[in-house]
Amino acid sequence: MIQFHWRLPMHGDKADIDKSTLTRGNWGPPLDGNQAPGFRGGGSDGVPYHDYLLETAKAIEIAGFDGALIPSFQDTDDPWVAAAAIARHTKTFRFMIAFQPPWINPVYAAKASASLQRLSGGRLLFNIITGGGGAGQLWWGDRIAHDDRYRRTTEFLDVFKGVWNGGPFSYDGKFYQVENAGLPEPLAGQKWPELYFAGSSNAALEAQGKHADFNLTHLEPFEQLRIKFDRVKELASKEGRTVKPAVRFDILARDTEEEAWAEARRAYAAIDWDARERQFSAQRRGDSVGSPIAEAVRPQRNKRVEDLLIAPNLWAGFGPLRPGPGLGVIGSYEQAAERIDDLIDIGVEGFILSGTPALEEALRVGEEVLPLVRGRLEPARYAAE
Ligand SMILES: Cc1cc2nc3c(=O)[nH]c(=O)nc-3n(C[C@H](O)[C@H](O)[C@H](O)COP(=O)(O)O)c2cc1C
């Protein structure tokens, strides 16, 4: 069955796509123009940010999604803590924790994961990320070069799986050595947390062939995606495994296509281009192979929003609106569902969708777009038609 996830805004959220001062909860300091301090005599709005994340998780659950990606960057809150907090107050919501192997020891990661599986009734997934290099990697004290980072990720997952599948487990790798590791008896035998795995380089695809359950990529023109997916499938089959394609992207969908464009124009009218250009140039410094492909079309000031359309409903204009990749889907509810069906046709089995604000857009996309996706429940029957 195809998985549909949303994305939790771990770096704060705004109540309207064109109003960066209208923030939600106390993630950041109160900003000039925020309504809450105005209403409350200048103080913070007093809502703990985790409460907003929980409300959003509940909306995601109600809207029919399987769960949500909980991203982790330098400027985000911590996904493990958020997942544990949300788990107690949701029933079906699956939390996809994003993390880079060097952030945590693999034996400890297996232990914390087993605890979360026990706590939540098996609702954990991962987005294994290996890092984009450059200053972003040094921020975490990580000096390992690009391809070696993927070797380290592979070793990390060797150890994680080895410990998960039963101790005593020993391993003698280049990056990790453990002796007689294992899980305490009450934590052993939990359901395996499926692994989404991001990365587009050859090194990434090889690592995915060995360990990933899903090959996760940002949106790209569909033919480009198909070629990438075929390559991962080929590498996985050499290992006797199956790796399912997954894509993450924003959706800006409204009743009609014109309404969606009007929303994009409204959002663009409020962009602070100086701030955005500084952010873009900082993002370009790493060694990521994947991101330059997706970022080839860059929005610039003075460009009309319509000029950023690179294929039917594929809009390269999301970058300046919120942190994240540029390419996503714009159009009517029907058109957005048709593009999702196009992706299902080329084999996508996992979707991570997002929008701003995360709470209302989760309800909108879950209630208006997902029911129109023909391949949602029975992709095989739909493809055979
Ligand atoms: C869908 C997706 C989500 C990602 N999420 C995160 C994240 O939460 N935190 C992070 O540090 N990097 C994240 N990354 C970046 C990856 O760690 C990595 O830098 C990127 O995939 C480049 O790998 P490559 O050189 O193999 O293309 C994400 C990448 C993708 C494609």
Image (cartoon, rainbow, N blue to C red):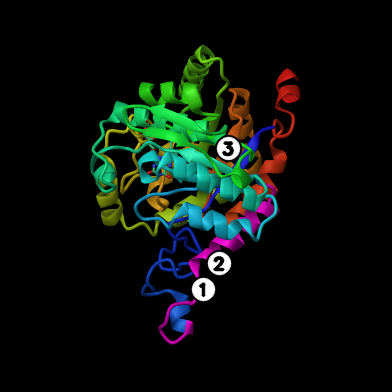
Front label number (2 vs 3): 2
Mark 3 C-beta closer than 8 Å to ligand 1: no
Which residue: 46% across, 76% down?
35
Quadrant that contains the N terminus: top right
* Residue stretch rendered in magenta on the structure: 39-64
Front label number (3 vs 1): 1
Q: Is residue 96 magenta?
A: no
Q: Of the residues shown, which amino acid type is indicated by label 3?
A: Phe
Q: Position of residue 28 (x, y in %)?
A: 39, 67
Name the residue furthest bottom. 41
Which residue: 44% across, 30% down?
170
Mark 1, other Cα within 10 Å: few <14 / some 14–19 / many ≥20: few
- Residue at label 3? 351
- Residue at label 2? 51
Q: Which numbered circle lies on residue 47?
A: 1
Q: Position of residue 341 (x, y in %)?
A: 64, 30
In three-dimensional space, the C-alpha distance between marks 2 and 1, rounded to whole angstroms, equals 7 Å
In three-dimensional space, the C-alpha distance between marks 3 and 1, rounded to whole angstroms, equals 30 Å
Q: Is residue 57 magenta?
A: yes
Q: Using the image as rendered, state which of residue 59 and residue 259 is in the foreground.
A: 59
